[in-house]
Image (cartoon, rainbow, N blue to C red):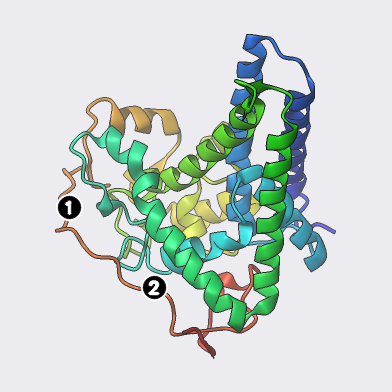
Amino acid sequence: MLRHTADLRTIAFVLTYYVLLTAAFVLELPWWGWIAFLVPLSLLAFFIAVATHNTVHCPVFKSRFLNSVFQVLLTNGYGHPVSMYVPGHNLSHHRYTQRTKDRMRTDKMRFRWNLLNQLFFSFVVGPPIFRDNARFAKAMRRVNPKWYRQFLIELVSYLGLMAALAILDPVKLFGFIPLKFLVFVVIPHQYAAWGIMGINFVQHDGADGEHPYNHSRNFKGKLINWFTFNNGYHGMHHMKPGLHWSLLPEAHEKELAPYIHPNLDRVALLPYLIEAYVWPGKRMTYEGEPLVLPPPREDEDWMPEKLKKELDIYDADFVKVEAPVS
């Protein structure tokens, strides 16, 4: 049933999210109970966003039907249609890392205080990604109706569940504001979106997107990688996007660690966050030099003139030129 048994952890995280969300809605909570549910729900929503990222590169199940169902569960846990993760991530960021066709390139951020670059990254790169998503969906409606139907299933499911939770919310602030829905659904989903886009800044700022090895910052700590499904091994992921997350550590040690600059091959995330955003809090290249940004660059259109008709999450990393997209 599963392609890799390691994804039992992925499924467990998703099920835990839904159990906690249900409990948060049906239980009468004291003030501290709201915090006690908000924190794990926010973290789990982010972990589901990471699982979404993994899924669009390497599906969890052998069955396409089960993958389609699982995408709906991920969509409702993350707050964004899984199918719509493909254009901005697989087809823009992965194919054109840190170049003008990469909507998530980090040189868009130009605050002097580096912490602000991290905090506001998702708000800067998000709008152009959403515009591209709409254009991509319009193109795929004609080029690949099967992909478009899956996208619609995810979108309608998400909007329907959100409406139901808002209407059925037992706690209405001022008699009409669905408070539990806002605290236990909207905030975790926004945190997940902010986090999954923002981690791109951590992983790529100051690295060389065109270098064969020094294109990504890696964090090899066991604890953080257990919770984030080895997302810390980002360089190896860029080198082999379709490689299952459970295989990344071994591949990293064999194929990347001997060649990567040591400043990009880190263990713990927290020391880097302090170094980059608190003290000294300066924006540096991976070689330890102050980062000199190029002049502001306009986004270039990444959309291929032609797309493979059967494009879906199973081959998104290997798009071929076959069918027109206009």
Q: Is residue 250 left or right of residue 217?
A: right
Q: What type is the residue that disc 2 sits on? A: Trp
Residue 131 location, x and y as percent?
43, 63
Q: Disc 1 on helix, strand or loop?
A: loop
Residue 260 location, x and y as percent?
37, 53
What distance separates the C-alpha of mark 2 from that of mark 1?
Answer: 22 Å
Location of mark 2 (residue): 302
Given residues 183 and 114, the one toward you in this image is 183
Q: Is residue 121 visible?
A: yes
Q: Is residue 244 visible?
A: no
* Marked residue nearer the N-terminal end (2 or 1): 1
Given residues 175 and 321, the one toward you in this image is 175
Density class for disc 1 (Cα within 10 Å; few <14, some 14-19, many ≥20) is few
Q: Is residue 66 above or below residue 76?
A: below
Given residues 116 and 55, the one toward you in this image is 116
Mark carried by residue 245: none
Location of mark 1 (residue): 293
Q: Residue at x 27, y 49 (%)?
A: 206
Q: Residue at x 30, y 71 (%)?
A: 300
Q: State the quadrant of the N terminus.
A: bottom right
Residue 222 location, x and y as percent?
57, 35
